[in-house]
Image: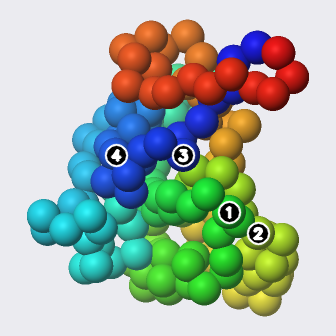
C-alpha cells in the first residue's frame, strides 16, 4: 500500500501544492502571496494564499466567500505560536473563512488554542483546519496535482 506524503516538499513547494489543490477544488481568484524570493514570505500578513469560493444555495442565490489560507509545512505537529499571526490578521481583515493547512497535523496545544480562541473571541469568520488526511482525500482523483507528489511505501505492505 502506498502512503500519501508531503514531507519531501520544501515550504515553498508545499504552498504551491496548496495553490494547485485549491484551484483543482474549484476555488477562483487564487492569489499566492509569495512576495519575496525567500523560502517563505515574512510579510504575507497572516496568509499565504487568498482565494474565493463561489457557493450556490438551493434557491440559486450565489455567494462569494473570501478565504485566507495559511500553510504550515511541518514534519511534526504545528505549535500554537505558528497560527497566532493568521488569527490576528483574520481578525483585522475579516475574511469569510480562515483555512489553516498543516502538511502533517496540528499539535494538541494548537487545537486547544483554536477551540479557546473560538469560544473566547467568537470571530466573525469561520476557522477550518486541514491536516494530512484531509489533503490526501482532497487530492484523490486529481492526477495532474498528484504528478508532483511523492508516494511512499508504507511499512505495512
Q: How is the image coloured?
A: rainbow
Horizontal side, residue 150 vs residue 49: left or right: right
Q: Secondary structure at mark 2?
A: loop
Q: Is residue 116 above or below residue 1?
A: below
Report if the CB atoms under discs 1 and 2 are less than 8 Å apart: yes
- Residue under label 3, please give it: 7
Please report the residue visible at 82 percent of the width from the left and 15 percent of the height from the top.
Answer: 157
> Which of these two is toward me, 138 or 124?
138
- Residue under label 1, please give it: 76
Horizontal side, residue 72 vs residue 51: left or right: right
Quadrant of residue 59 within the rendered picture: top right
Quadrant of residue 30 within the rendered picture: top left
Q: CA distance from mark 1 to mark 2?
A: 8 Å
> Where is residue 70 shown, x and y percent of the image?
47, 62
- Residue under label 2, please give it: 107
- Dot placed on the residue nearer the N-terminal end, 1 or 4: 4
Amino acid at each position: 500500500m502506498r502512503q500519501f506524503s508531503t514531507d519531501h516538499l520544501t515550504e515553498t513547494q508545499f504552498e504551491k501544492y496548496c495553490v494547485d489543490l485549491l484551484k483543482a477544488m474549484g476555488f477562483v481568484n487564487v492569489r499566492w502571496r509569495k512576495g519575496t524570493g525567500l523560502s517563505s514570505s515574512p510579510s504575507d500578513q497572516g496568509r499565504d494564499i487568498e482565494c474565493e469560493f463561489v457557493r450556490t444555495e438551493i434557491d440559486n442565490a450565489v455567494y462569494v466567500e473570501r478565504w485566507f489560507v495559511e500553510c504550515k509545512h511541518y514534519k511534526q505537529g504545528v505549535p500554537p505560536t505558528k497560527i497566532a499571526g493568521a488569527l490576528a490578521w483574520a481578525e483585522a481583515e475579516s475574511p469569510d473563512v480562515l483555512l489553516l493547512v498543516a502538511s502533517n497535523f496540528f499539535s494538541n496545544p494548537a487545537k486547544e488554542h483554536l477551540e479557546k480562541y473560538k469560544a473566547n473571541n467568537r470571530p466573525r469568520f469561520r476557522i477550518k483546519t486541514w491536516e494530512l488526511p484531509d489533503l490526501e482525500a482532497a487530492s484523490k482523483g486529481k492526477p495532474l496535482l498528484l504528478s508532483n507528489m511523492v508516494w511512499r511505501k508504507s511499512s505495512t505492505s
